[in-house]
Image (cartoon, rainbow, N blue to C red):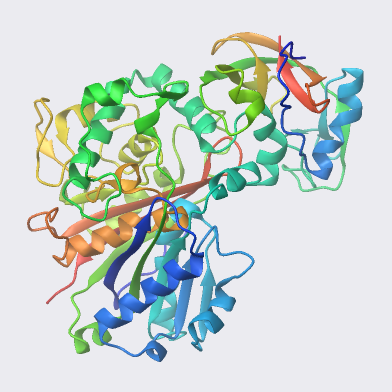
Amino acid sequence: MSRPASYQGVALVCPVSVGYAKQSEKGAAYFIGRSLGEMIQRAGIAKDDVDGLAISSFSLGPDSVISLCQHFDISPRYLEQLPFGGASGVIAMRRAARAVQMGDADIVACIGGDTNQAGSFADLIADFSTFTRDASYPYGAGGPNAAFALITQHYMEQYGASREDFGRIALAQRYNANHYPGALLGHKTLSMEDYLNARPIAGPVHMFDCVMPCAGGEGLLMMSIERAQTLGLPYVTILAADELHYAHRDDPVQYRAGWTEYAADLYEQANLGPGDIDMLQTYDDYPVISMLQMEDLGFCKKGEAKEFVRKTALTFDGHSFGDKTESCLPHNTSGGQLSVGQAGSAAGFLGLVESVRQLIGQAGSNQIANARHAMVSGYGMINYDRGLCSAATILAKGEA
Amino acid sequence: MSTSSSQSLPPRKRTALGEQLQAFAEKGELHLQQCAACNLWSYPPREVCGHCLADELSWQPCPGEGQVLSRVDLHNSFEAYFSEQLPWPLLSVKLDVGPVLYVHGDGQSGQRVNVKLQLDAASAPVFRAE
């Protein structure tokens, strides 16, 4: 199989996270529009300099990306809408990078934005796909909780991971969120006792394994490195990126996803190994899925994520919680969805935007020291019994 | 199927294809879609064969033997019918003929079960493991 061509020459700039709230009466266009407004202000460009839009949103309907042109009074020559949930950020980045390389657009705004109105999450899960309507929802398995409970239970039985192991991921992320002002749950600490004693939701899945649906926007601009340099913007480059969907489709229960098929190529193209990665941002809609990514992206072997999270400090500053950790891999450094909140499709941009912020040194009090390389992974779309999407990228701090 | 005195009912909504299970559920006869071109079984209901994409799917009597892949108890639900009766067990079962089904019923992972097609409290078609 052929590999993606190089992403050279493309810059990621101006990461923004906008308007996070547990609920909002505003529409999705608010969160997307404010993200765009904040990005062009930071970039010091005019609105019409943005000639491409790559948008992800669950709650934008009946509008779509073309409707947004009139909402925002812009005339782009490149439009993309990416209904890929937790993988939408990395996928948007891949699409936009090609547009910039090929001249289809000079500056693409990649934005995930969603509102969370009363009852909207229940409406979303009640009719998420034709398969869920026929084969999940009538069984009480509404929304992702039940599907992930079945996956988590199977993983625990297969590989011996414990709730404490999942708790290690949740605790480290909450610690990170305690240092990231944008996190909706960042004002609360989380102890292992809190984690273990939380309200049960489904099987082994308890309250702190589940994300909190919320409203918010995440975005960044993509342009040529030359343009970023001319504008004086600190930037990040793409060393490698790939995606693969509904891989391993004969696995009766999901315990891996498409990452296994391209992780080695990502490292080879980036000329790096897992040990060179300074931060890992996984899609953490349930800690077990972060474990699958740690395994499938080569940070440990299949089934060994439990040992990996016991011996690796996952916090941004190396803090551990009583474990004798041997090394540090900052993971979901703003708190991930588990502690920031899941703003619909914006959650699929969370790790990407946070990585760019970290690599350009604009993270704030959760800043990782001397970060040069980030691995960002996406996963998403529970069409029935598993997440279908996988995507991942290795990013690097741009040359000054 | 349920002995609950609950006023609430399970979700009735299905796709047009999913509704086609109704007639078989009323007779208590397990049927799934099978492709006449490749003989493989499909589930959840599909418009074309998920294996060979032929337009030759039809509902056929299907053996219900299978194995429980995973089992959890739901402690939370957005639907009143389930939330009034928590915890509610949920199984995923791999039928010997291929497809993976979410089903009602009891069982543990690895256990052999027989899957039936029945009507639920809303008189809607559902699978149940016995």
Residue drawn where x is 74% and y is 22% of the image:
B127
- Quadrant of the image containing the C terminus of chain B: top right
Residue nearest the observer in this picture, A147 or A371? A147
Q: Nearer the viewer, residue A374 or A38?
A: A38
Identity of the residue drawn at 16% across and 42% down: A315
Query: In terms of image quadrants, where is residue A270?
Result: bottom left
User: Where the N terminus of chain B falls, by quadrant?
Assistant: top right
Q: A334 above or below A98?
A: above
Towards the viewer: B45 or B56? B45
Q: Is residue A168 above or below residue B5?
A: below
**Residue A71 in the figure: left or right of residue B36:** left
A51 relative position to A198: left or right:
right
| Residue A205 x, y percent position in the rendering | 42, 26
Left or right relative to A123: residue A331? left
Q: Is residue A193 visible?
A: yes
Residue B103 location, quadrant:
top right
Residue at 80% over, 20% down: B117
Q: Position of residue B50 (x, y in %)?
A: 72, 43
- Give the x, y percent position of residue A49: 38, 90
Location of residue B17 with respect to A152 vertically, above or below: below
